[in-house]
Image (cartoon, rainbow, N blue to C red):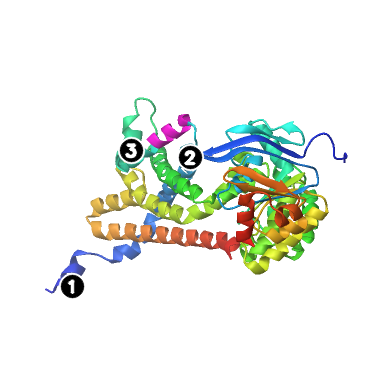
Amino acid sequence: MSKIERVLEVYDFSIIFNQFHIFIPAAIETLKITIASILIGLIIGLFVSLARLSKYKLLYYPASLYITVIRGTPILLQLFIVYFGITSIVTLNAFVSAAIAFGTHNGAYIAEIFRGAIMSIDIGQKEAARSLGMTKIQAMKRIILPQAFKRAVPPLGNQLIIATKDSSLASTIAVRELMLKARQMGSSTYNFFEYLIIAAVYYLIITSILGFVVHRVEKKLAVSDR
Amino acid sequence: MTKISDYKMVEIKNLHKYFGKLHVLQGIDLFVDEGEVVVIIGPSGSGKSTLLRCVNFLEKSQRGDIFIEGSLIERKQKTINQMRQKVGMVFQHFNLFPHMTVLQNVIEGPVQVKKVTKNEAVILAEELLKKVGLEDKRDVYPAMLSGGQKQRVAIARSLAMKPDVMLFDEPTSALDPELVGEVLGVMKDLAREKMTMIVVTHEMGFAKEVADRVIFMDEGKIIEEGKPEELFENPKNERTKAFLSRVY
């Protein structure tokens, strides 16, 4: 028996096509976790980046500490702390735990993305805004942040794709997303490989679509550069 | 409008500024009358740009007082913001807002700071763009403009706040030589309309033609001042002479 014949005997590739559709709810769950964690991350990231750029120590130090802690510990550990670690205080369901843990995690990275983008805006922009009589907050809101957001789009797109893949860790706390679905289907039929391939294809589709959307946004925002 | 009265439009008293240990402004006293055009010249590093930036508090001086229209500008954010509405500034590198069209650049100040309605601001902005010869560029982004056009938009943006004083910080230094004229032209128009102006520049021709008074600065001090014909033709101080012989 040749190797190829053996592969065809062990694996049932028809599963990949026939059962592809049963992963749709799990894919939606994956998307939901990803979007929730990025939205939470964007909000946290915006305020933390501003706090890190602040001259007030009461803002600067907590923001720096937050970023150091999040970046210095594994995301899986962060997830477990939220899901298992604080059950004595509040019990959160698995999805909410994942959204909070991943949102907090993304917040630290997004804060650094924003901080870099804000710092890259020429000081003359702030000076021009302030010389018109704008307050610091107005100058930040109207002049600096819109330009910084634009520069932040490519690295944010990157973070979005990382977040999509990181969402697979939610399978460890039984969120019914792609990874869990693949493992459950695999262990009940022993066709692990086929179901894992299905999950892989879904991840690829999701990350490709997100990558495409980010690219379109980038292009759309570039109108003022022409 | 009241006649030229008991207060000066801008008055600078004993201004000192340090960058670290470097004493860049060493006790500047200067006043500017209403409607007067004062041109500040001097070698690079003489502190002339710093002086200009201290007037609207983009740089914080360590000692000394600034009076605008007779009132002392206290070092409080609110007072400074209010003062800046009356003191326009034009920068060497234009600093237009690249994410906004020409029109949006010009209406930004009136709408956001003065809370003028958008319609009113647009009417004023169109008038100002016409004045600087760029009414056809209103919906274009700054990236599409030449340096000279950018600077004219920047002047219009500043004028949209209806300032009482205009500060020009080397407005033509970043321009290609053939574009300098169009910007100086707009500034001459302003001078003719009796706008109070303080101009830091290397354009000696402009100083001669437009200035009511020329100030020569060196090493953080005002060395000499006078009417342009006096200062250019018959400088009294050795350093002024040396500088003028180098730039002519």
Between A134 and B5, which is closer to the camera in this rendering? B5
Q: Chain of mark 1?
A: A
Identity, as a three-letter code, of the amino acid under mark 1: Ile
Q: Position of residue A2 (x, y in %)?
A: 13, 74
Q: Nearer the viewer, mark 3 or mark 1?
A: 3
Image point 82% across, 50% down: which residue? B194
Residue picked out by circle 1:
A4
Instruction: Kindly identify the residue that appears in the image at 32 percent across and 59 percent down.
Output: A200
State whether residue B239 is above or below residue B29.
Answer: below
Label 1's element?
helix
Question: Same chain for marks 3 and 2?
Answer: yes
Nearer to us of marks 3 and 2 is 2
Would residue B224 be visible to someone looking at this image? yes
- Local crowd at mark 1 within 10 Å, few (<14), some, or many (≥20)? few
Per the image, is A140 magenta?
no
In-image side of A27 versus B123 (left or right): left
B3 or A162: nearer the viewer: B3
Kindly report the secondary structure that dominates the magenta region of the rendered protein: helix
**What percent of the width, then of the height, locates residue B15?**
63, 36
Dot 3 or dot 2: first in sequence order is 2
The three-letter code of the residue at mark 2 reads Leu
Q: Which mark is residue A53?
A: 2
- A147 and A159: which is toward the camera: A147
| Label at residue A78 | 3
Left or right side of B92 for A62: left
C-alpha separation, residue under disc 1 versus residue under disc 2: 60 Å
Query: Badge 3 local density, few (<14 within 10 Å), some, or many (20+)?
Result: many
